[in-house]
Amino acid sequence: MNYYKILNSAQTDKIEDITKKYKELAFKYHPDRNISNTSEATEKFKEINQAFSNIKLNHNKTYRSFAQNKFDFKHFTDKLINKGELLNTIINKAKNIDVTEFFNVFFDNIKQFRFYYDDIFSKIQTDDINVTINVELSDIFNNEEKIINMVRKRKCFKCYTNDLKFCRTCDNKIYYEQEKCFIVNCADQVVVFSGESNEEKNKKPGDIIIKFICKPNSIFNIINDHDILYTINHFTKEPIRNEFIYLDKQTYIFECSYPFASSYIIPCKGINIPYSTKRGNIIIKINTFNGENNNFKFRLK
């Protein structure tokens, strides 16, 4: 398809002139101006737009390519001279290279890379280290952070740089017992430190997996991972007015009247949901006889 012919133009025309002819034809064949022959005008209008889009995309490239193909003798000679000077500089520098030193540095870098990253392509992994820690429910609720010291077998990087002298860190065994502190948030409940387990030759280090187990609480329990269950025993038809100190150390009052529902939900007062700004709920369960009433009051004292 000859896009220039569609726009009554030539390839040697300036883009400004082609644009002017495009606008004239687009105005002429616009469907809104050809109501009596809308279908043909629409097809012609699409053809004009397609032609102009292709010309606009390629016209400058074609012109630039044509201009660049013109032979410039001065540019050619300057380029040849510059290349000659560059080649001469490279040759002169090559004469001063100590080949022995070059290969020593090269192989030393390869050796160092293999020392540091001998496990990079390994498919075998050392065992994960699993740690279980018992914490209070209040620690989980209040996002308390714990510092955990752990000792793992890790590679000694000082061995490679001590010029074969005695290494006081690992006694020249390459691997040594390294202590490291890990800071964890109790609210996460399960924390994984990738690649922080023991290191062994030709093996990728496994993970350290820290899991928090909530100690039994005489008043509150965790349910549904992030909700707090609070149970009230009430076996009369008298209205309930229950006062309790919650995990945030504030005193709350819960009130409801008969008939009682089996449970009541207080939104966004539970445990923090990891990787979000949301919290679970408080679920207040009433142990009583049958009858339900969803009207209740819950407030700070």
Image (cartoon, helix red, strand yellow):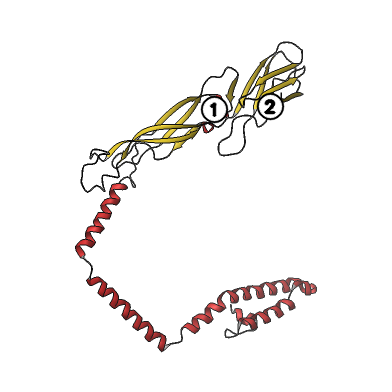
Residue at the image position 73 percent from the left and 15 percent from the top: 290
Visible in this render: residue 225?
Answer: no
Q: Amino acid at mark 2?
A: Ile
Classify 10 Å Cα crowding around label 2: few (below 14), some (14-19), many (20 and above).
Answer: some
Which image quadrant: the C terminus?
Answer: top right
User: In the rendered image, which residue does mark 1 sit on?
Assistant: 139
Q: Secondary structure at mark 1?
A: helix
In the shown orientation, is residue 109 left or right of residue 2?
left
Q: Position of residue 273 (x, y in %)?
A: 58, 34
Residue at the image position 62 percent from the left and 73 percent from the top: 53
Pair 2/1: label in front:
1
Q: Are marks 2 and 1 in contact (CB under 8 Å)?
A: no
Q: Position of residue 272 (x, y in %)?
A: 59, 33
Q: Earlier in the sequence, mark 2 or mark 1?
A: 1
Residue 37, by quadrant, is bottom right
Q: Amino acid at mark 1?
A: Asp
Q: Position of residue 56 (x, y in %)?
A: 60, 76
Q: Position of residue 74 (x, y in %)?
A: 41, 88
Which image quadrant: the N terminus?
Answer: bottom right
Question: How far is the residue under mark 2 from the one under mark 1?
Answer: 22 Å
Q: Nearer the viewer, residue 215 or 10?
A: 215
Q: Nearer the viewer, residue 58 or 227?
A: 227
User: In the rendered image, which residue does mark 2 sit on?
Assistant: 265
